[in-house]
Amino acid sequence: MSDFLGGGWSIYIALVALLGIFWCIWLLFSQRKAKVVHTADGAVADTGHVWDDDLRELNNPLPGWWKWMFLLSCIFGLFYLVLYPGLGSYPGILGYSTDGALMSSMTTANDELKPVYAKYVKMDIEQVAADPKAREMGQRLFLNSCAQCHGSDAGGAKGFPNLTDGDWLYGGAPENIKTTLINGRGGVMPPFGAVLNASQIQDVTNYVRSLSGLPADDLKATRGAEVFKANCVACHGADGKGNIALGAPNLTDKIWLYGASEETITETLTKGRIAMMPAQDKVLSPEKIHLLTAYVWGLSNNKPTPVTK
Ligand code: HEC
Ligand code: HEC
């Protein structure tokens, strides 16, 4: 109940709820005194409403059981509002909240699953990745927590790395992947639009394309190599093969996070790129992160390593 913008709304809502209940009780008692009208022969008079020719609405008092049920539900409502949240932002004396109930049911579920996970926590990532049951659990976790960004087949999308290709921004060893999951990652490619002029950007774009054997203008690429040496090697390395400590991608392979067209590379250089892999340590238990690490590691290590690359 923390959604109210100000205390005034909270009081207003609480008053509406309370007055509603008291109005119901007042209505019950105010109608109690209504006189029952009798006809001349002593029968109860009807209200004058007649349906289906002969169905008359009599003017009897409310039955006792109904009156008491009505009153009890009003009292139940009042007790409920004292115990549980319902009166504006007043939390109720039991301190119940749907957030709290969700957290405690998640904690219970995690505790119940602990023995199931315990077996895998003691195993190496390589061993867990080889276990079909663990892979199945890992895949389910992946579909729940990761697929919205990396795709249900972990194949990635523009700006979201493919996790199946054996090419890693931050390293593909089990401990690298686990660190990625626990702490998250934030890759920053700084913008060079204000540092380099348009022709320097064009030159270095051609040089970057030449690194992976894409068609490029030789003259521009040669000039671009100098621009690269002066501005890019600190992060992407002298050979352009990247740096997993910074998440700077290898520019010499044919795998692109954003794209290899001249247009896209120019955009990457001019505006820079920022990517965010959210930390999972507050979201997933260490056991789940262990299973996910094995699942992700296994995606690119389930095939024999290609001999040439
Ligand atoms: C909100 C989107 C988002 C979600 C959710 C997400 N990721 Fe990521 N992930 C990213 C982005 C973006 C990057 C690239 C970060 C960068 O470029 O610096 C990334 C990077 C990674 C990397 C590093 C890849 C490499 O090449 O080194 C791994 C591994 C990874 N994610 C696994 C996961 C797993 C497992 C989950 C589920 C627990 C997950 N991600 C959930 C967006 C997401
Ligand atoms: C401060 C470190 C740093 C410097 C300096 C830097 N980069 Fe980057 N670059 C990165 C990072 C980190 C990424 C990945 C960004 C992400 O994860 O979104 C990146 C991404 C790129 C990409 C996108 C690759 C792809 O797969 O789509 C290109 C191209 C690139 N850099 C070229 C350059 C060039 C050319 C220069 C020099 C003019 C340069 N970078 C300077 C860190 C750097």
Image: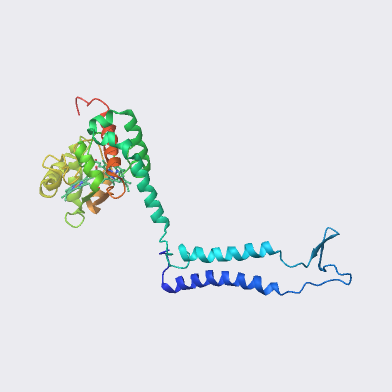
Asked whether, in this view, residue 143 is left or right of residue 31, the answer is: left
The colouring scheme, among rainbow, by chain, secondary structure or one colour, is: rainbow
| Percent x, y of residue 238 | 10, 42
Residue placed at 57% from the left, 69% from the top?
21
Q: 12 or 269, which lies in front?
A: 12
Q: Is residue 165 above or below residue 307?
A: below
Quadrant including the C terminus: top left
Q: Is residue 289 visible?
A: yes
Residue nearer the viewer, 79 or 296 = 79
Q: Residue at x 56, y 66 (%)?
A: 75
Considering the image in quadrants, where does the N terminus appear?
A: bottom left
281 vs 51, left or right, is: left
Report x, y in % for residue 293.
Answer: 26, 38
Residue 170 vertical placement versus 307 (above, below): below
Along the horizontal axis of the image, is 279 left or right of 66?
left
Q: Position of residue 165 (x, y in %)?
A: 27, 34
